Structures are given as C-alpha cells and as structure tokens.
Image: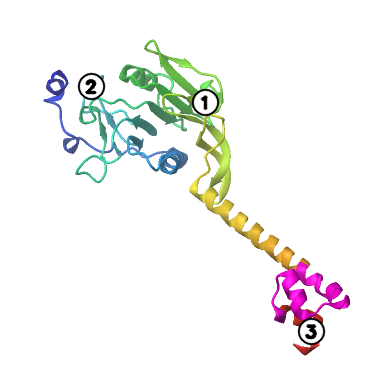
Amino acid sequence: MVQADLYKNLPTSDELPDSDDTPVDNEDQNLLPNYLLFLLKLIWADRQDWYFGVDMGIYHTTGENCRIPVIPDGFLALGVPRRKPGQRFRRSYVLWEEEGTVPIMALEMVSWSPGGEYAEKMTLYANLGVLYYVIYNPEYWGRDQHQPFEVYKLIGGKYQLQRGEPYWMPEVGLAIGRAQGLLGGELRELLTWFDAEGNRYPSAEEKALELEAQAQAYQSQVEQERQARLGAIQPLHQRGLSTAEIASILSLSVDEVDQAIRPDET
C-alpha cells in the first residue's frame, strides 16, 4: 500500500514521451544493442521474465523531475514480463509501472559527442541503483582516458571498475564482452553475451551458416564414400563376382554397377 501511495499521483506511460527525438551519431549505437537483444531472444527463448530496452527512456523518481527520463543505449531488467498484460509493447520503461524494478544493467556507447557517460550518467545510474554499468568506447577511449570496454559494479552505493573480459555477472547468469563475429554478413567487433566458461553465444546468422557448412560437409563426405565404392567395382568384377554380388557388397544399385562395368553400353 505504501508503494502504491508513493506512485499514486505520478503520470502514466501514456502521458509520457516515448522518445527525446535525439538522433544517434553512429549506427553502432542502435545496431549493437539490438544485436544483444536479438541474441538474448535466442539464449532465453523459454523465459518471459526479462526485458531488454534499446534507446528507450527509463522514467524514475530519483531526479528533479519524474517526467525527464534517462535514455541508455541499452538496458536489461530482470523479474519483469517481456510483454505487459494487454500491451503489445512498452513505449518506455516507467519504474512505477514495473513495481519499482530497476534495470540490473545499463549500457552506454560513447560517440563523437561526449554524453556524460563517465560523469553525469554514472552518477544517475548509481542513484537509480543499476547494479552493472557497461561503457563501450571503441573509437574515443584515448580521448576520454578510459579503456574501450569497461564494466562498473555498484558497491556500497558507488561504481567500482571491474576486471576481466568477458565479464561474468552472476546475478544475470551471463557474461558480456567483445568478440569478432558476423553481423549482416560482415566480420566485425561485437558486443555480445558469453556463458560461465567464456564461450560466446552464436547469433541466428552464425548458427544458420554453421548448419549450412555442416550440411555441405556431410554431402561432401557422402559423395567421397560413394566414389570410393564406385572405384571398388572393377577390382571386384575382375575377381569374378557377379553384378548382384558387387551391388550387395558395396550397397549400390545393380544399374550403378552395370554402368561402371560396361559404361559404353549404358
């Protein structure tokens, strides 16, 4: 009841803007968070208790105005439904409509225009209670005097830089880090998910290519074995075995054996 009273006079998601209309200044700010989202849909296909938002406003009550959201490039919330009852999708992530469930991880990708990733946003996410804060800065890390990939964990109300990549998050059950992988047919550096042993989860695109390669390898092996059996026909024929006997021994049809023995007659 206290929680309900606390949120009683706050605006609903229908009353709040679903975008700040600020364009991203590079395609990776949208591309890589979406890659993480679609990969999660494969990894957690049988789970409905999580939500990953991309370039979506998080409305909260820890700032000066509850109508001003923080908008990470990506965030992960656990213990919330992927689809809210009666809704096709979320327009934004409104904490007082999510029973106060704060995202467990926020992702910021540093761009040409510094956006306070190492200062204002870090303070804001700490005040909000986001456990893990990931900053990806592949292009401007030298300018900002940081590393290209950093993970911070909220400890005692303050973020502390963590070691290791991929970085394992036990509360999430996944690790996050960088790796070379396929995206849109292009081999490039990705932000991606790993298991507890550090194995990277393949994307749907990579799985499809792997299955295709396995099918091609299988067909190649089958053809090689068939050619080897066809090559054994003449030696067996020279030993006086009948066409039917050769076909039975080599698991070939009688027609295939006849064609190999008397090619000019077929």
Q: Nearer the viewer, residue 121 or 260?
A: 260
Q: Residue at x 23, y 19 (%)?
A: 64
> What residue is shown with label 2?
61
Q: Residue at x 77, y 80 (%)?
A: 243
Q: Residue at x 60, y 58 (%)?
A: 215
Which residue is farthest bottom? 265
> What residue is shown with label 3?
263
> What residue is shown with label 1?
167
**What segment is highlighted magenta in the picture?**
229-255
Q: Quadrant of the N terminus?
A: top left
Task: Assign a secondary structure to mark 3.
Answer: helix
Question: x, y (%) of residue 134?
Answer: 45, 26
Q: Main secondary structure of the magenta part?
A: helix
* Residue 77: quadrant of the picture: top left
Quick check: is 152 in the magenta stretch? no
Task: Assign a secondary structure to mark 2.
Answer: loop
